[in-house]
Image (tube, rainbow, N blue to C red):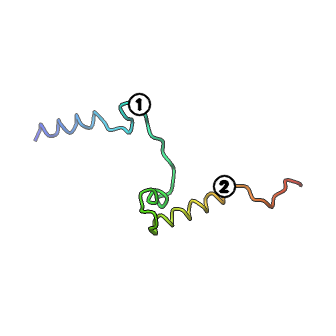
């Protein structure tokens, strides 16, 4: 029992990181779970359609609207 505890402590001490051997560290995308599921869904599945529609709504909310002229 004691060797297993020691091995597990060594494994925890070694740690797991997302950094690769070359030093590349992937960046977080900060996407919603729906959009993340859409990345791996088949092209015409409901998950992909839901992700695309959510992405379109988010993009529409971010872009400036055409009706604002900037005049007071």
Element marked by disc 2: helix
Q: Residue furthest top?
A: 22
Q: Residue furthest right?
A: 72
* Among the 4 quarters of the image, the one containing residue 68: bottom right
Q: Residue at x 61, y 59 (%)?
A: 58
Up the image or down, 64 lies above or below 44; here it is: above
Taking 12 as reference, is 64 left or right?
A: right
Quadrant location of the N terminus in the rendered image = top left
Task: Return the residue at label 1.
Answer: 23
Of the numbered discs in the image, which one, if any, rests on residue 8?
A: none
Q: Position of residue 19 (x, y in %)?
A: 39, 35
Element marked by disc 1: loop
Q: Nearer the viewer, residue 2 or 30?
A: 30
Q: Position of residue 21 (x, y in %)?
A: 35, 31
Up the image or down, 33 lies above or below 21; here it is: below
Q: Position of residue 14 (x, y in %)?
A: 28, 33
Q: Residue at x 88, y 54 (%)?
A: 71
Up the image or down, 26 lies above or below 36; here it is: above
Taking 40 as reference, is 6 left or right?
A: left
Task: Return the residue at label 2.
Answer: 62
Q: Nearer the viewer, residue 49 or 26?
A: 49
Q: Residue at x 69, y 55 (%)?
A: 63
Taking 25 as reference, is 3 left or right?
A: left
């Amino acid at each position: 029992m004691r060797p297993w505890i020691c091995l597990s402590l060594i494994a925890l001490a070694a740690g797991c990181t997302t950094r690769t051997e070359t030093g590349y560290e992937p960046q977080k995308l900060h996407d919603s779970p729906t959009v993340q599921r859409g990345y791996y869904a088949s092209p015409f599945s409901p998950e992909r359609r839901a992700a695309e529609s959510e992405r379109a709504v988010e993009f529409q909310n971010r872009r400036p609207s055409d009706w604002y002229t900037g005049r007071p």
